[in-house]
Amino acid sequence: MNNPKILVVDDESRMRKLIKDFLSTKNYEILEAENGQKALDIFSVNNDIKLVLLDVMMPVLDGWSALREIRKTSTVPVIMLTARGEERDELFGFDLGVDEYISKPFSFKILVARIEALFKRCYPDTEEIKEFDGIKIDPVAHVALLDGKDLELSMKEFDLLKYLTDNIGVALSREKILNAVWNYDYFGDSRTIDSHIKKLRKKLGKKGSHIETVRGLGYKFEL
């Protein structure tokens, strides 16, 4: 599943932006709504939304009411975001059809982990084996092959190759690659990307030419 679409519903614009900025680095396409009614309007015209992050306390229409309406027509996975932490609220949410529950404040790493786990549970075919000119990538087995032979990539080399091939033809800045593959908590610099690209190209041999340098920006995978 390429660039799954997630609807982020929260009345705090800063929170929406933080979530959007972080999830965008993980190849998710983000739609935003500032209240439950706006969320329903967006949801009604986007039948390819794969997950909803839904705040509870919002003006116009709260999260519980929006969830009730969503559940009348859809089983889309829903993660409730709330400042509340009381057990009865969580039980109430599960009764309405909540799939996961995250209390604010939360770690963005935990949010991503919950999303990925939910996707694997709800969309078992999310991680598809891909093949490009003899380069085969199996995300589930975490294995990359070149003409049938194991490339023997390190974890970061694999993640880097997968990120590049998830964005074929897209010029990716070093900063974007660093955030996507090494995450925001990495304290090194972009030179580590150049080093990993060099190793990847060497292991790919002639096929390494698919990884092109974009002068002054970064890299892209081109077929």
Image (spheres, rainbow, N blue to C red):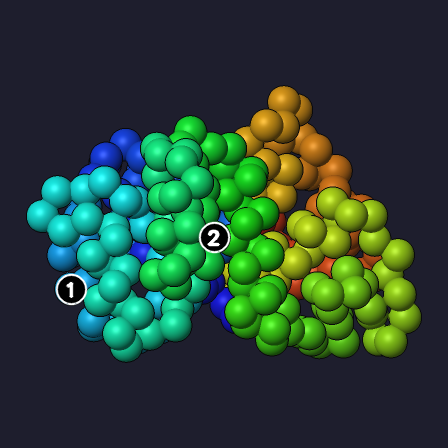
Q: Residue at x 39, y 68 (%)?
A: 76
In this image, 142 relative to 103: left or right? Answer: right
Q: Residue at x 42, y 50 (%)?
A: 91
Q: How many marks?
A: 2
Query: Furthest-front residue in view?
Result: 88
In this image, 5 relative to 128: left or right? Answer: left
Give the percent coordinates (x, y) of residue 169: 51, 63
Q: Residue at x 23, y 40 (%)?
A: 57
Query: Furthest-left residue in view?
Result: 60
Query: Is residue 24 visible from the viewing direction of this image?
Result: no
Near-viewer residue (186 or 112): 112
Q: Residues within 10 Å of mark 1 (few under 14, many from 20)?
A: few
The residue indicated by pointer 2 is 100
In this image, 156 relative to 20: left or right? Answer: right
Query: Is residue 44 visible from the viewing direction of this image?
Result: yes
Near-viewer residue (84 or 189): 84
